[in-house]
Amino acid sequence: MFGFNFIKFDAMTYVLQYKNGGIKREGRGLSFWYYRPTTSIAAIPMGSDDAPFIFEDSTKDFQTVTIQGEITYQITDPKRLADLLDFTVDAKGKRISDDYEKLSQRVVNEAQAAASVFLGNTTLREAMKGAKTLEKAILDQLQTSEAIQSIGIQPLSVIVLSVKPTPEMARALEAETREGLQIESDQAIYKRRNFAVEQERAIKESELNTEIAVEEKKKQIADKKMEAQIKKAENDRELREMKINADIAIEENRQKLIELQSENKRKAADAEAYRMEKMLELYKGMDWKTIMALNGKGDPKLNVALAFRELAENSGNIQNLNISPDLLKDLIK
């Protein structure tokens, strides 16, 4: 009414009220009455804002890539920014200019310039793998850029969502990668088979080594048995030799004994012969009858026998001989 309006802003908006070419009031989250015909109001958002970007560029090896990402920034000097861009709002608080969108474009342009420098020194493969490095390069460039600092904003972060080659190059890379993966798969299969062969060879070698060790043990056992048999044979031979030597010693002793016995018997016989000879010398020249009578020692039977013999020798001179039955009976007994 009568050109007076009331306007209110939130706490995240920095407000500049201009009147008659000068700043009448400024600050965040203001609310006030103003006279519209002589007043202009600029409202600068103080919160962080995101500037998405997507652009194409060429790598060191002349391959076109598409880079997509997002930049987060914040206005730190609203008065300086208000001097460069138009943030004027109408009575309802809506901007009457599109300069705020130009701010995001300026940030994106700086980011594209930084990315172009980075890609100019990077191959396609490196660029596709170096998203984090590209993010750092863009952020460093924005934070040190005079153009960005001059408009009073501060870059907070940069995110590179993708670095994509052209569809034809992507298919070529996919084919190459597929072939590489196939080669790696073949190599893995070969290594796996080779490993299996090596393991089988190692197992066979282990089995052969085990068999060799077993055969060596058997040979050692056989050698030990042979040594034992040889030792036993030697012991048996020594025992036989000892027995033979003992038998020889016994026989030698027996021979000596027999010789000694023979010698003793011979000496005994000689002594007996000498005794008999001396004894017979006593009977030499004696009648046998006398000898028989001496040897009979008065035996009646011997005397009877001598008597009958005497009768037999002189039977020619005997005419009659009477022998009583009693005598014959006694002689038979």
Image: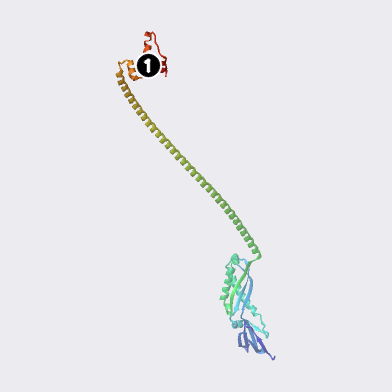
Instruction: Say how the picture is coloured.
Output: rainbow
Q: Nearer the viewer, residue 126 or 91?
A: 91
Q: Tell whether 319 sits left or right of 71.
A: left
Q: Nearer the viewer, residue 245 or 62?
A: 245
Q: Nearer the viewer, residue 234 or 43?
A: 234
> Where is residue 117, by image quadrant?
bottom right
Q: Residues within 10 Å of mark 1 (few under 14, many from 20)?
A: few
**Identity of the residue furthest to the right in this view:** 1
Q: Secondary structure at mark 1?
A: helix
Q: Which residue is mark 1?
A: 304
Residue 311 location, x and y as percent? 37, 12
- Against 177, residue 326 (above or below) is above
Residue 90 location, x and y as percent? 67, 85
- Against 277, residue 76 (above or below) is below
**Identity of the residue furthest to the bottom in this view:** 2
Label 1 is placed on what type of residue? Val
> Where is residue 249, by image quadrant?
top left
What's the residue at 50%, 46% (across, down)?
A: 217
Q: Quadrant of the N terminus?
A: bottom right
Number of marks in the rendered image: 1
Q: Quadrant of the C terminus?
A: top left
What's the residue at 40%, 34% (across, down)?
A: 246
> Where is residue 183, by image quadrant?
bottom right
What's the residue at 31%, 18% (across, down)?
A: 283
Residue 21 location, x and y as percent? 62, 88
